[in-house]
Image (cartoon, rainbow, N blue to C red):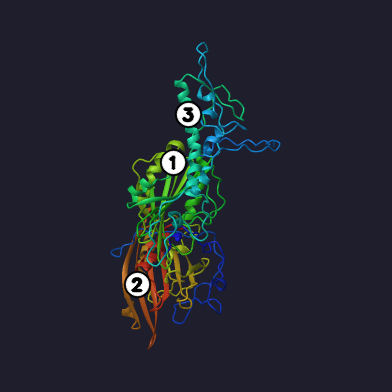
Amino acid sequence: MSDDKLFRPRRAMPSDGEQVDPAQADDTVGGPRSFGRRGFAGPASAPSPDEDGSQGGSPDEPSGEGPAEGPSDAPCEPSRPIEQPDEQPEPEVATGVPAEHAAFMRPGAAPVALADALDVTVPTETETVATPSLSEAATVPVSQASPVEARAAAPTPASFPSPPGTSSPASPEDSLHAGTRPRRGLGLPGKVAAAVLAPALAVGAFFGVRELTRDDKVVVQQTTTTPSASTSTPTPTPTPPLATASLSSVAEATTALGGSWAEARTWETVGPSDPGITCMSNLPQQPTPEITRQRGLTSKAATETAVLQRMDAYATPEVAHEAYVQRLAALSACNDVPALLQSAASVTALADESFSMTVAFEDEQTLYHTVLISRTGRTVTMTDVANLKEAVVAEKVTTLVTGSAGRLCKTSAGTCPTKPVTRVVATPATPVAGWLAQSDLPRVTRGQGMWSPTQPAAVSSRGSQCEDLTLATAAGPTARSQRSYILTQDDSAPDGFGVDQVLFTFADEKAAADFSAKIIRNVNECAKRAATAKVSGGTNVSTRGADRIPVKGRVWKVQQAISADENVFYRVGVVQTGNRVAYVVTNTTESFDFSDESWIMIAARAGQRASQAE
């Protein structure tokens, strides 16, 4: 896997609110696949427009056993037209005079040494010595490259090695990009050094001369093109809420994540072609930040661990809270293809508010992103840690962010971190509450497939025929509905492959528990009632849903013989939480099937989503 795919932009699935037309979603020749096929327990409801919303969610791990300084806040004044002088030949600069020294030369003056570039008057013994204060000195214009240009041109550390069979990137910055990479700086290292050091040397020389003239009791008079400075005490410039130094550092990444780290690049402005945080590709209209900073860090680990951190400072904490809520909603309902929402964690004692989620991108090689979003006063921080081998746990990402959060709270009027604690929780609800989201469902074939949901409708699924009841009419529920998920764009998928979710609501928790227990008992005993049925892989599911409400149930594999030499296969699951029961069923084949682990996760997630139903 090439390094430039770690933080690449991704295409988005249709959101839960978009109407799904299987004929358009399917990439096979001859139109859409029929959801029902021979031997399948029953057709799903026809695809129809869906409610607004998107996807998200992640169970606790279900068990298989037992039930730089930013700009000032002051508005900029309109610039006045610059008067264009008559054309005059530019003064020549003698060979050997550094460019940074020319800033101290009077217009039109001949090239001279730095000491002669200043107009120095030595007082006689009868003159009164007067050393001007710092506020009385006029600003000396210095020709310098902007910080952004200097950073863009600065050389970057060597990148970590690419996996076998892939080419190594030119620099660590490449590991953060995908698709079109931003243009690199054109300056050579020597030119970069001159651009970066020129203002520093000029300013250093200015203050150095001032100190020397004080000791020698001389008066330094500056001739500049700017008006003379006011002798009144200047108004202190407010400390900006966010600076480049606020971002997490190489040293902090080394401490929190281990290994050897390097800074790939730091951005003082972020453009559309720059790397972006995972799952933020389809944000609604966002409040405009006053200051933005972003930094990429890369490691030399074989798993290509990388960090991308972005900070946005807003006018007020209220505006920052609005931005935080929108970004957390986008992360919780991530619909980037091929995203799978794996887990979520609450984070306390880090900032005013914070939350973390882990998303797996199921390409041919799975890439894991653990994203932590936090708000400290006026500033929202998003930290994205990517890894190939396995997900980086939220606790490590929180440790990485703690240092930057401590710096931010002092400038951004926010809560400082104390002893941050992470805790695995259910993924926040999506707008279509109660139902699985597209990114709750894993791919069967690596790098292929897209799940398209239908609108919740009347129950039509017949299940696996081992439930020994009619899902559409069985007594007990006060309400029931069904939603189907159709897999498209997978060349290996059989016709009509999909998942049905049926959601039952009951008068109370006991009625829901009794209904779930009945289905579990019937499926467990199916082979005793029907000679054509085989049931295997029975595994209990246990996790927690919204507000840590218990979710428990069971999953199975079911085989039904429909003739002497033909069988159909299903995976079935039922989970109960509170006064609701979620039932899931899929039609599989011997060669195209979810893994046992994936099906347990789907059933657990269905229970978590049921706990979020309104």
Residue at position x 56%, y 45% in the image: 288
List the residue tagged with mark 2. Answer: 556
List the residue tagged with mark 3. Answer: 207
**First in residue order: circle 1 vs circle 3:** 3
Name, please, the residue furthest toward the left. 65
Relative side of 69 to 74, left or right? left
Name, please, the residue furthest toward the bottom. 564
Tell me whether the residue at label 1 lies in contact with that at label 3, contact meaning CB atoms closer than 8 angstroms: no
Residue at position x 49%, y 33% in the image: 203
Q: Where 303 falls versus 521 (above or below)?
A: above
Identity, as a three-letter code, of the amino acid under mark 3: Phe
How far across and down, in percent of the image, does residue 519 sit? 37, 70
Q: Nearer the viewer, mark 1 or mark 3?
A: 3
How far across and down, in percent of the image, does residue 310 sit? 47, 48
List the residue tagged with mark 1. Answer: 245
Tell me whether the residue at label 2 lies in contact with that at label 3, contact meaning CB atoms closer than 8 angstroms: no
**First in residue order: circle 2 vs circle 1:** 1
Identity, as a three-letter code, of the amino acid under mark 2: Trp
Q: Where 223 falls versus 315 (above or below)?
A: above
Secondary element at image label 1: helix
Secondary element at image label 2: strand
